[in-house]
Image: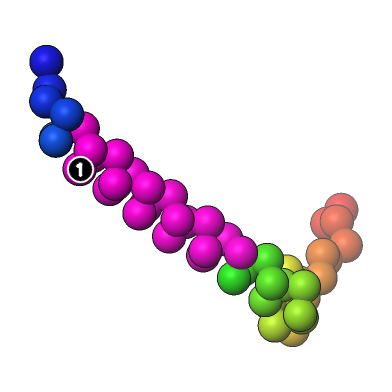
Amino acid sequence: MADRHALTIVGFLFAIVTVAVMLTAAMMVKGHADGRYSLEGAATAKASPPRR
């Protein structure tokens, strides 16, 4: 079995990765709410009429 020291290090690594992902997600949500990020692009694609 793994010793407690190694499990502590692995736990801290998972915690650091989790915090980094949460901060990135929070920044993206805040940017989207502020209007900096948009799902609609400036140029939208238009569908052509069906060919006969």
- What's the residue at 59%, 70% (across, down)? 27
SS at mark 1 in the image: helix
| Image height of 40 relative to 50, above or below | below
Q: Nearer the viewer, residue 37 or 42?
A: 37
| Image height of 16 relative to 26, above or below | above
Q: Callout 1: 10 Å neighbours few (<14), some, many (20+)? A: few
- Which of the 4 image quarters holds residue 38? bottom right
Q: Main secondary structure of the magenta part?
A: helix
Q: Which residues are magenta?
A: 7-26
| Residue 33 image position (x, y, % from top left) | 77, 73
| Residue 2 image position (x, y, % from top left) | 12, 22
| Residue 37 image position (x, y, % from top left) | 68, 77
Image quarter where the N terminus lies is top left
- What's the residue at 88%, 62% (across, down)? 49
Decide if residue 43 is in sight here: no
Q: Nearer the viewer, residue 44 or 35?
A: 35
| Image height of 37 relative to 48, above or below | below
Q: Is residue 18 left or right of residue 32?
A: left
- Which of the 4 image quarters holds residue 43? bottom right
Magenta segment includes 4: no
- What's the residue at 21%, 32% (across, down)? 7
Q: Is residue 19 left or right of residue 36?
A: left
Magenta segment includes 23: yes
Label 1: which residue?
Answer: 9
- What's the residue at 23%, 38% (across, down)? 8
* Total numbered labels placed on residues in the image: 1
Q: Is residue 13 left or right of residue 20?
A: left
| Image height of 2 relative to 34, above or below | above
**Three-letter residue code for mark 1:** Ile
